[in-house]
Image: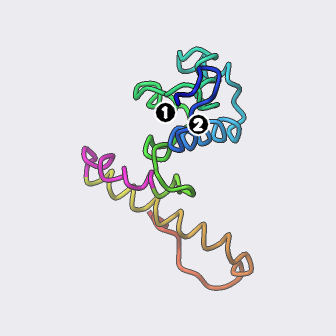
Amino acid sequence: MTPSPAEPRGRDPELERLADRLRSTRDYLGMSQQYVSDSTGIPRSAISDIERALRRVDSLELKKLARLYTLPVTYFLSDQDNADPAALAAAGIPRALVELTDGDLQEVLNFAEFLKFRRAQERDPDAEGRERPDPPGAGR
């Protein structure tokens, strides 16, 4: 027996996951569907349908949305229910480093060390008065 057109077909869990990630990311960033539409050129009604899993998003639209949300496309396509956008973004680092000079690469390393140092200070605010090494790049 075939379902009548009025009966909803089974929902695609991958489409649901993608729709949920797109909607929750937009909400988290405080962007309206109209703002997303204006920024990407994707019609607002299409944004709504995509976020409700009523319409599939094509690859160019997903690329535009990921760029606007400053997240890698892989975050939205990941099969993991609790995908970590930072880990997926880190996977793109080697590609981003390809054309950098040796000096640029050293700056990237210095910045990574700075972030690590800052994170350690945030975790242990009582360490303020303790002896600690100079942050990377200090003394230049």
Q: Estimate how packed mark 2 is, as few (under 14), some (14 to 19) or many (20 or more) residues with alpha carbons within 10 Å.
A: many
Q: Colour scheme in the image?
A: rainbow
Q: Is residue 70 left or right of residue 48?
A: left
* Residue displayed at 53% across by 15% down: 41
Q: Is residue 89 left or right of residue 54?
A: left
What's the mark number on residue 85? none
* Residue displayed at 52% across by 28% down: 2
- Residue type pointed to by label 1: Arg
* Residue displayed at 53% across by 20% down: 40
The quarter of the image holding the C terminus is: bottom left
As drawn, 91 above or below 62: below
Front position among marks 1 and 2: 2
Q: Is residue 100 magenta?
A: yes
Residue 25 horizontal/vertical position (percent): 63, 40
The residue furthest front is 1
CA–CA distance in space, label 1 to label 2:
16 Å
Q: Is residue 4 left or right of residue 137?
A: right
What's the mark number on residue 19? 2
Closer-to-camera residue (130/53): 53
As drawn, 26 above or below 38: below
Element class at badge 1: helix
Closer-to-camera residue (26/133): 26
Q: Estimate how packed mark 1 is, as few (under 14), some (14 to 19) or many (20 or more) residues with alpha carbons within 10 Å.
A: few
- Residue type pointed to by label 2: Ala
* Residue displayed at 65% across by 21% down: 6
> Which range of residues does the magenta coloring cover?
88-101
Residue 106 horizontal/vertical position (percent): 34, 58
Element class at badge 2: helix
Q: Which residue is disc 1 drawn over? A: 67
In this rendering, the count of numbered labels is 2
As drawn, 4 above or below 111: above
Q: Earlier in the sequence, mark 1 or mark 2?
A: 2
